[in-house]
Image (spheres, helix red, strand yellow):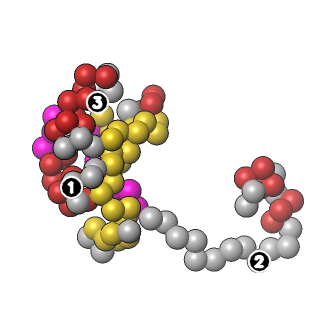
Amino acid sequence: MAFYQGSQVIADEVIVRLHNSDQQTLARLAAQMGGARLIPIGKSLGLHVLKSNSHTVAALMSALRATSNIASVHPNHVILVTAIPNDTMTRQLGGIPMLNA
């Protein structure tokens, strides 16, 4: 884990939205970021997790904002559950059992 602007984030990892997700663009971006891995998470939206072995979140954010094929770039924030419902009927809500919540 790491911190970026006061928020807990996954270290060396950002979420990018690309204007163009063809193989050449992905390979060029990975090479530009020192051999980073790009993992698609929302193909129709052009969303990818970019995992770097050599750049911090701050360095990735700075470098990727200046890249023309990047529509947006965000840190991969860590979201922590701080409370659970105390409603005894929660499991009977539609769909909740299917989520294993």
Amino acid found under the numbered disc labelled 1 = His
Q: Tell me which residue sits at (33%, 62%) in the image.
A: 11
In the structure shown, which secondary structural element does the residue marked by tag 1 occupy?
loop
x then y, percent, for residue 35? 24, 41
Which residue is denoted by mark 3 in the rendering? 26
Rendered view: 23 above or below 62: above
Identify residue for label 1.
55
Counting the numbered discs, the total is 3
Compared to 6, does 22 lie above or below? above
Q: Residues within 10 Å of mark 1 (few under 14, many from 20)?
A: some
The amino acid type of the residue labelled 2 equals: Asn
Q: Within the image, what quadrant is residue 81 found in?
A: bottom right
Q: Choose between 70 and 9: the one closer to the eye.
A: 9
Q: Label the magenta part by its dominant secondary structure.
A: strand
Q: CA distance from mark 3 to mark 1?
A: 17 Å
Residue 45 picture location, percent across and down = 42, 33
According to the image, label 2 marks what residue? 86
Nearer the camera: disc 1 or disc 2? 1
Residues in magenta, as a range: 66-77
Horizontal arrangement in the rendering, residue 61 relative to residue 48 (left or right): left
Residue located 83% across and 62% down the image: 91
